[in-house]
Image (cartoon, helix red, strand yellow):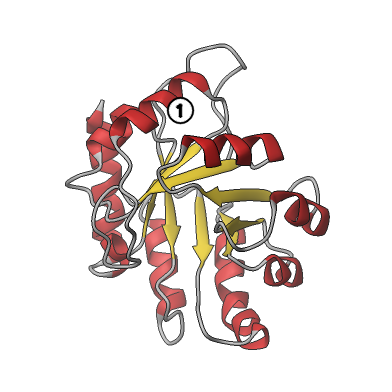
Amino acid sequence: MSSHSGANAPRELSCQLYLISPLDVAGRFPQRLERALDAGEVAAFQFRVKDIDQHEAARLAGPLQEICAARDVAFIVNDSIALAKRLGADGVHLGQSDGSVAEAREELGREAQIGVTCHASRHLALEAGEAGADYVAFGSFFPSATKASEHRPGLELLEWWHAMIEIPCVAIGGITPGNCAPLVRAGADFLAVSHAVWGRDETEAVEAFHEAIRTAG
């Protein structure tokens, strides 16, 4: 997960998929993940589980991490710097109360991909960038079946960030193949999606997202 051009050059529109796991990753989910990643290019997969201990989380993460590694997909841990370190994950995604970028960098090293949730705030995003985040996430752009949010950024935030800031941005929240085109055109570098993929046939969903991104411009 990286930016697309030199410091002062305008970035071309180039949007990629960033898959977020459902909360239940047991059972046949590893096979579903394989199907999703084999259906089209995916830049990253975020492992997001709640209310289980780190040992159980690590057990569930293992096969998913292997699937991602075999396909050169970045494996990002949600919220937990400690779990990301334990797994040797490619990175961590931090909410506003999950620890600092500096702490994550110290624990995970220079090569780790560190993302920060910035809701609808330019200020939080600029702070994250100055602290050394590798990407920032804005949302929720639409009502989400995965996670409730009172924050509702507009397309102008993506447009401003794309024009002014080199750090990649992720759009998140209720994004589907049917509504993602304006986000792509506004300059989102990544579309973070969960229910829109795991709530239906994952192969068809990833293919539909790729088609929507391809035709958005």
**Residue at 23 percent of width and 40 percent of height:** 212
The quarter of the picture where the C terminus appears is top left
Q: Position of residue 165 (x, y in %)?
A: 54, 24
Please give the count of numbered marks on the rendered protein.
1
**Residue at 58 percent of width and 12 percent of height:** 8
Q: Nearer the viewer, residue 87 or 138?
A: 138
Q: Residues within 10 Å of mark 1 (few under 14, many from 20)?
A: many
**Helix, strand or loop at disc 1?**
helix
Q: Position of residue 134 (x, y in %)?
A: 63, 41
Quadrant of the image occupied by residue 80: bottom right
Quadrant of the image occupied by residue 197: bottom left
Judged left or right of residue 112, residue 195 is left
**Residue at 75 percent of width and 46 percent of height:** 111
- Type of residue at label 1? Trp
Residue ID for mark 1: 161
Q: Position of residue 143 (x, y in %)?
A: 23, 57
Q: Nearer the viewer, residue 115 or 202?
A: 115
Looking at this view, name the residue that lies furthest to the left. 178
Judged left or right of residue 12, residue 44 is right
**Residue at 58 percent of width and 57 percent of height:** 93
